[in-house]
Amino acid sequence: MCPLIELEHFVDAATAAGFLSIDRRYLLKLSRLGLVPAHPIGIGCRRQWRYRISELAQWALAQNATRPDNVSGSPRAPRKEK
């Protein structure tokens, strides 16, 4: 017998964007660019995107850990003095 595995359900873009506190359209853009963990459903350019909250949480924590504040190259970021 195989042990019971608790499966995590997929959520839609609106739910995932709410979890990340970002706009749904921005999340879809990140998904199309392959920057967030997303799972396309369907073929062609009109794909439906689905997400797992646990994957998004891991991704968000990894983003925070790998890039310190104000190193993004933004023109609003303060420049480092040499």
Image (cartoon, helix red, strand yellow):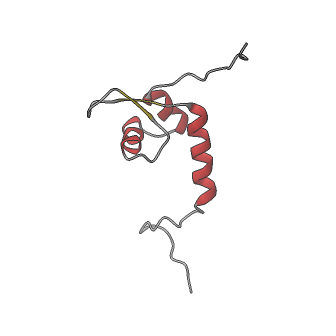
User: Number of labelled discs?
Assistant: 0
Location of residue 29 with respect to 75 vertically, above or below: above
Furthest toward the top, the residue is 1
Q: Position of residue 68 (x, y in %)?
A: 60, 63
Furthest toward the front, the residue is 1
For the C terminus, which image quadrant?
Answer: bottom right
Location of residue 2 with respect to 29 vertically, above or below: above
Q: Give the side of residue 69 with respect to residue 45, left or right.
A: right
Q: Position of residue 67 (x, y in %)?
A: 58, 61
Q: Residue at x 42, y 40 (%)?
A: 27
Location of residue 77 with respect to 13 vertically, above or below: below
Q: Residue at x 41, y 69 (%)?
A: 75
Location of residue 32 with respect to 44 vertically, above or below: below
Q: Residue at x 58, y 37 (%)?
A: 55
Q: Position of residue 20 (x, y in %)?
A: 53, 38
Furthest toward the bottom, the residue is 82
Q: Hey, which quadrant is residue 9 in on the image?
A: top right
Q: Hey, which quadrant is residue 30 in on the image?
A: top left
Q: Position of residue 18 (x, y in %)?
A: 50, 32
Q: Residue at x 62, y 21 (%)?
A: 7
For the N terminus, which image quadrant?
Answer: top right
Q: Give the side of residue 6 with respect to residue 78, left or right.
A: right
